[in-house]
Image (tube, rainbow, N blue to C red):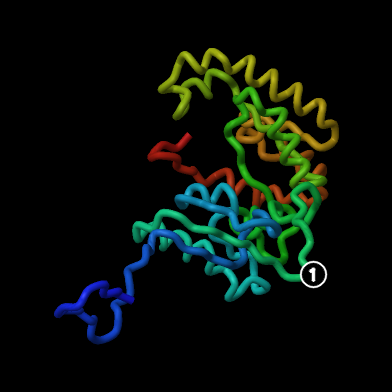
Amino acid sequence: MVQYLSPGVYIQEVAAGPTPIAGVGTSTAGFIGMARRGPTTGRPTLVTNWGDFVRAFGGHFTLGGAFAGATHLPYAVEGFFANEGQRVYVVRVVPDDATAAQTTTSGGITTRLVLDTVLRPRDDTRVTGFKEIRWYGDDVVEYVAWLREVFPGARFVVNTRDHEEVRRSGWWAKRPENAEQLPAIEARILALAEGLGDAAYRVHYNDYVTDPSALRGLFDWLGEPFDEAAVRSVLDKRHSVGGRTD
């Protein structure tokens, strides 16, 4: 209220109409929803970019019908940052009866993800697996230990080949300096296989290409019937990698 301390004529301007609403920032938001991982108690978690969210809560997920209609949080956060948002406070929620996912036992979330998104075996599959080519790394022992945790009971087929043929093939032919390490790499792999005991079985490419019956022992080890005609049919088909067939 204006106070007038002396007599006189005064002009007072009075605003007409409603006071305009002041603008508010839209660079900060809060999201609540289900995520692959992350804290479920305590204060909301501040993330400032999509990478932060993935590291703290995981990315997009589709883990079956149980999560249908509840997978929107990652998309919302990703869209917010794509539209120049700067800060998000995230609260992850879980069902009351939720339990921690297990990654070291059969049926854990990692096992399910690999089976459902990578291997994708048919319902009538008895034996499934994948080809791993990066056995030359120094961390091969740790890698195999991790695979055995994720897939209890997993077994490993160790496939070797004559070194001179390997040196002339694909990746190795372009890197002759690396090919010199083949004997040491193979020795490390074979030592690892020996330590696995009955969980590993060695085959040699040059042997079974010449005589497919050399694979009979592998099938016995897997507990599967050996169909030599079917094996020969597979081996007779040339497989191309990057335009080459060797």
**Could you say which is closer to the camera, residue 239 or residue 1?**
1
Q: Residue at x 52, y 61 (%)?
A: 74
Q: Residue at x 72, y 65 (%)?
A: 124
Does dot 1 land on a helix, a strand or a loop? loop
Q: Position of residue 3 (x, y in %)?
A: 30, 74
User: Which residue lies under the disc numbered 1?
Assistant: 97
Give the number of callouts.
Answer: 1
Kindly identify the residue that appears in the image at 85 percent across and 31 percent down. Answer: 197
Given residues 200 and 238, the one toward you in this image is 200
Quarter of the N terminus within the rendering: bottom left
Seen from the viewer's position, the closer of residues 2 and 13 is 2
Q: Residue furthest right?
A: 198
Q: Residue at x 45, y 40 (%)?
A: 241
The kind of residue on which mark 1 rests is Asp
Q: In the current view of this chain or complex, which residue is farthest to the front?
A: 7
Image coordinates for residue 13, horizontal then vertical, percent:
19, 79
Q: Quadrant of residue 90?
A: bottom right
